[in-house]
Amino acid sequence: MRFLVAVDAEGLACVFGEPGRSLNDSRDLDFAREEATRETNAVARGLFGAGAQEVVVWDNHNGSLNLRYDEIEKRCRILAGVGEVRRMSTVDQGYAGLILLGYHAMEGTIDAVLAHSFSSVTYQYLKVNGREVGEMAIDGAIAGTAGVPVVMVASDRAGCAEAKEFFPWAALVETKQGLGRNMALSRSPAHVQAELEATAGEAVAALDTMRPFTFSSPVTYEVRYQRADAAESRSRTDRRFRRVDAFTVVARGSSVCDFF
């Protein structure tokens, strides 16, 4: 069995960021990198302990290059860096499941820590087939087109609720309860790491209950930008998109993989 662990950062234990800043511009970044590495290792231990033959860690926060690679569990392989021709480029290489670790809720979610959809300064929302989506649904659907189910998600309370809407079969680990964009009541990192290891093993044992997540085809992909000039540029430089109002563009494709 092979598993892909997709690692973001905003949904980790005790990661809060600072008001008016992205996580990468905050004093919290160094801790987030360390905690992402520790939580990754906890998941990897759980997967290997449950019989996984290979675990690939995809470092995907803010364009990659976040984890402390020399501290990653030695049995893992690491997918990192920039230059992918498409998002999650190895997902069609025979994985039994995808784990979304440290993910966050979509833009506009109330009391969700550092909520955004790829970029809080760029997008107001993203929709697929009329349904508002964030990074969890997009990455889950990309994996789903390759027949790979999301088997586990770790996020704050709002992120776990979002994950349950899209992947009701997946195992969930709640890392913290958001009290605002930059405040939360967090569980201790050590407690979260222990639960991640145990839950990863449970997810492997429950593989036969998991199923791939996809959107019905063809898909309608709608993007609402924060700025009108961004919508104008998208519609003029990518002929797939038509502009429906000052801030919004829409396109159709066979799957979300056409756009990511």
Image (cartoon, rainbow, N blue to C red):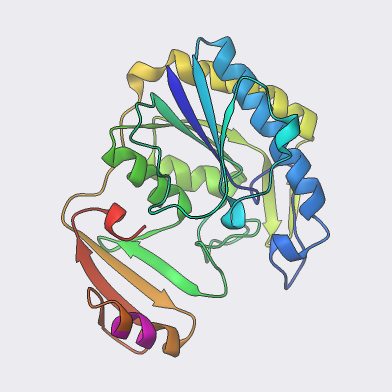
- SS assignment for the magenta stretch, majority: helix
Identify the residue at the far left of this view: 218
Quarter occupied by the C terminus: bottom left
Residue occupying the point 56% across, 70% down = 120
Q: Residue farthest to the right?
A: 27
Q: Is residue 5 left or right of residue 146?
A: right
Quarter assignment of residue 169 = top left
Which range of residues does the magenta coloring cover? 232-236
Q: Nearer the viewer, residue 180 or 205?
A: 205
Residue 173 in the image: above or below residue 63: above
- Foreground of the two, 129 or 118: 118
Res. 173 image quadrant: top right
Number of numbered callouts drawn: 0
Say if 194 sits above or below 102 in the image. Answer: above
Residue 232: % across, % down: 36, 88
Tell me if residue 164 is in the magenta stretch. Answer: no
Left or right for 167, reference 106: left
Q: In which quadrant will I find the N terminus?
A: top left
Horizontal side of 203 relative to 19 (left or right) equals left
Q: Nearer the viewer, residue 245 or 42?
A: 42
Q: Where is 26 relative to 229, above or below? A: above
Residue 61 percent location from the top left of the image: 60, 52
Which residue corresponds to the image point at 75% horizontal and 55% vertical from the top-left?
16
Looking at the image, which residue sits at the far front?
Answer: 83
User: Residue 130: x and y, percent?
Assistant: 27, 64
On the question of residue 186 being in view, the answer is no
Can you tell which quarter of the image residue 253 is in?
bottom left
Q: Position of residue 30 (x, y in %)?
A: 81, 50
Identify the residue at horizontal 50%, vertical 58% (top origin). Answer: 106
**Going by the image, does 9 lie left or right of 30?**
left
Which residue corresponds to the image point at 34% horizontal and 32% vertical from the top-left? 148
Q: Is residue 143 visible?
A: yes
